[in-house]
Image (tube, helix red, strand yellow):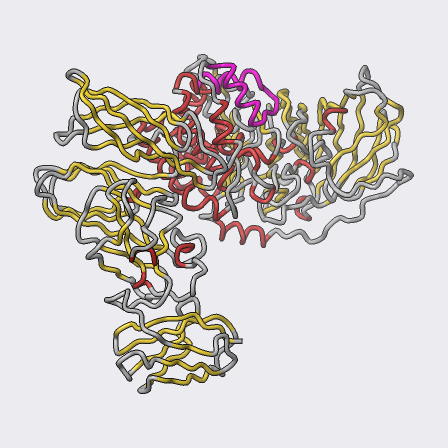
Amino acid sequence: MKKFFLLLFVAFASVANCQHSHLCKHGQLQNNLVWSPKSSENDNKRSDTINIINYSVYLDFSNASAQEIQGNCAITFHPKQNNISHINLDLLELSIDSITQNDTLITYSYNDTLIQASLLSVLNTIDTATVVVHYHGSPQQDASGWGGFYFQGSYAYNLGVGFSADPHNYGRVWHPCFDNFKERATYNFEILTTNGNTSYCNGQLISDLVSGDTLIRSWEITSPIPSYLANVAVGPYTHARMDHISALSGLTIPVWLISSPSDTSSFTNAFQNLDDAIDIYESEFGLYKWSKVGFVAVPFSSGAMEHSTNICYPKAVLGSGIAYETLMAHELSHQWWGNYVTTESENEMWINEGMAVYCEHLFLEGKYGYTTYINNVKSNHKNVLLNAHINDDGHYALANVPHLHTYGDHSYKKGADVMHTLRSVMGDSNFFAGLKSIQLNRAHRTINSLEFRDELNASSTVDVTDFFNDWIMNPGFPQFSIDSFSVSPNGSDFDVTVYTKQRLRAAPSYYNSVPFQITLLDDSWAKASKSILLSGIVDTVTITIPFHPTVAFLNENDKINQATTGENSVFYSVSNLDLNYSEIRLFVDQLDDSVFLRSEHNYVAPDGFIDPSGWNAQYKLSEERYWTIHGIFGNNFRGKMRVFYKGQSPGALDYELFNDGGTGIFHEDSIRLFYRSGAGEEWTVLPNCTVQPAGNPLDGYGYINTDTLLPGDYTFGWISGPVGLNDQIDKKEYRIYPNPTKNVLWIDLRDFESSNYTLTINDLNGKMVQSESSCSSISLLDLSRIKPGVYILSVMDQSKFILSEKIIVH
Ligand SMILES: [Zn+2]
């Protein structure tokens, strides 16, 4: 499935409009059983003892205006073990009228979540049985607002997962089932509708039975599906046929676009590239195996849900042309990833959702070319590095994402991010052959991360064991860079020995066997690219090239999504440019005929050193990021750059740096840009920089302009303690006391020459709460009108900043 937030306000409105008027909490108890279930069985274990063969669901929607359904579900099953006397079924807060087996009432318990039904006799593995649950009620929506059963105007439909439900599988809101990923059964549906409404379900339409204004439609899906992929959609529907001739097989794939008649033309327009999407995925993963491609428009505006052959798709975006076609492609791709081969557990949702987001990229590549693909991969990668750990409240292994973040950035965006790297590690032919092999070998089955790995290993000559250990089974990212290189002549060629270093971002151990492209250039722009395999904290590789290089860097073509984003630029004239992947603004003020620049933004601590006895040692360096500039500048080059510091809120790139647990005094004038020409050099403050607070000098946001641009590394440093505007080492004594305080604060500035101060108190959001002038070097502030809390006292002499300090008011 896919959620989106663009339309969230619509979603809230629609949820608010269809709150259920009551909850059915009156489940009947005919309980002579001691066992008392408390919750649904949130695992695949039941499917090891009983195999459900078929669900036959009959539902009557004639009372849809009261948001009620009534009907029954016949569950046909056979035991996988002997001596089975009960069957446990998930069903959420509906009312059970009776349960029968062979037309005989059987006893059961039901706690609004789980049914335990006693079978008429003990069953063994040679037996097959059918129990029929008769039920009615008002089906539930998920508390998150995403998933469950919806009644909206003439429409009624389910979305098969609940974002906050546990388990997330949500077939149980409308029929009794084993609500897990492993159990798969065929489905038959008979859906009774009135008032001109029709029903659409998974699979094929078998029959329409019309009687007055009552319609009973029968549907059948003969491919087994898990309960969360079952779907019923009722509404004023018709469907348009856009049948597709498979480029791979030449066979016709029925395509049904289901909507109200008034939406049909916008639907077919919005899906004009569906044919391409089907062909792209068939060529990459194998033939489409389902009986139809079906999309049904529903008035749910916060995303789409990939029910097999009956994908619920937001009606609200049909009028937007192809603007949402990656959503179309995402949901279509689930018919391979998620529906045909399904994640074994919610913790490994990357197998469903990371693959589907990666399939969006693959659709764009197949339709619009590699440049569109790689631009989307890069954009997603930057987004993951900046936001995934913030949005998901931590760094997780893709194979072990906690329940709360099943549908978070890691499963979706980092899953896709890592698939791009896997493709680079395996090479295209191995990668796609491996994915096809998984589709064949795991058809209609679950798969976990290690099985995914083993399938790829079995299908190709590339061993992905290290890859899965590093990138899937553990959190974080590596960051490889070239520390230095040496060159020695070798006949008419040159041996270049490259010394690399690996740093880690939120990862527990160093990555191994990562294939990088290394690019070497000389001053006349002769260029060589080679593939090298890097492992461990440091590595050394020697390559032979036909020229003496002056510049060397890794990953020019972004094949490996490591903890760096960067780009190459060529300048032919005086210009300035935002380089978004390297987080800098570049100014070229003077140049020869052209300038080559490789700029990188690294999302790791810039290890290295500051002489502990030197002046620079009073600074703390960023542990979050640093920049690297490579270039062939020419003799007459003059340029500079601007880098933004971003410490304004928790999670911002420099927030940790500015909140290092020091004295708590903060002013942006104390931020410095540090520089080293290479990884072996000491970090030193870059001279002649200008700090521009960009508004409030206490909010942690602004930028630094350099007056020159040099190849090398850059990072931020920050000094704890009062710093003057122009002379950061001119420390003068002062006293501010008592701190913490209740209602008064003394400020003793006798060490300063001036006697004309402005004393300002801001809250931590930068809002001024008190400001006073003082003509004395010792001042007394009355804080009795200030609410208890933490504040920043700033002292200015005329317009000159003197100091700021954190104060606590009880
Ligand atoms: Zn999805």
Residue 527: name its quadrant.
Answer: top left
Which residue is at the front of the view, 19 or 442?
A: 442
Q: Is residue 401 above or below residue 648?
A: above
Q: Identify the residue at horizontal 81%, vertical 22% (top origin).
A: 129
Q: Is residue 728 left or right of residue 141?
A: left
Image location (x, y in percent) of residue 701: 34, 59
Q: Is residue 106 above or below residue 166?
A: above
Q: Main secondary structure of the magenta part?
A: helix
Which residue is at the front of the view, 752 or 414?
A: 752
As drawn, the residue found furthest toward the bottom would be 775
As drawn, the residue found furthest toward the front would be 613
Q: Is residue 457 magenta?
A: yes
Q: Is residue 450 above or below residue 429?
A: below
Which part of the image, by quadrant, shows the C terminus? bottom right
Q: Is residue 183 visible?
A: yes
Q: Identify the residue at horizontal 54%, vertical 54% (top origin).
A: 13
Image location (x, y in percent) of residue 264: 46, 35
Which residue is at the front of the view, 507 or 785?
A: 507
Q: Is residue 539 above or below residue 742?
A: above
Q: Is residue 453 magenta?
A: yes
As drawn, the residue found furthest toward the right would be 32
Q: Is residue 57 left or right of residue 387?
A: right
Image location (x, y in percent) of residue 746: 42, 82
Image location (x, y in percent) of residue 127: 82, 17
Q: How many marks?
A: 0
Which residue is at the front of the view, 37 or 108?
A: 37
Q: Is residue 673 left or right of residue 635?
A: right
Q: Which residues make up the magenta segment?
A: 432-460
Q: Is residue 260 visible?
A: no
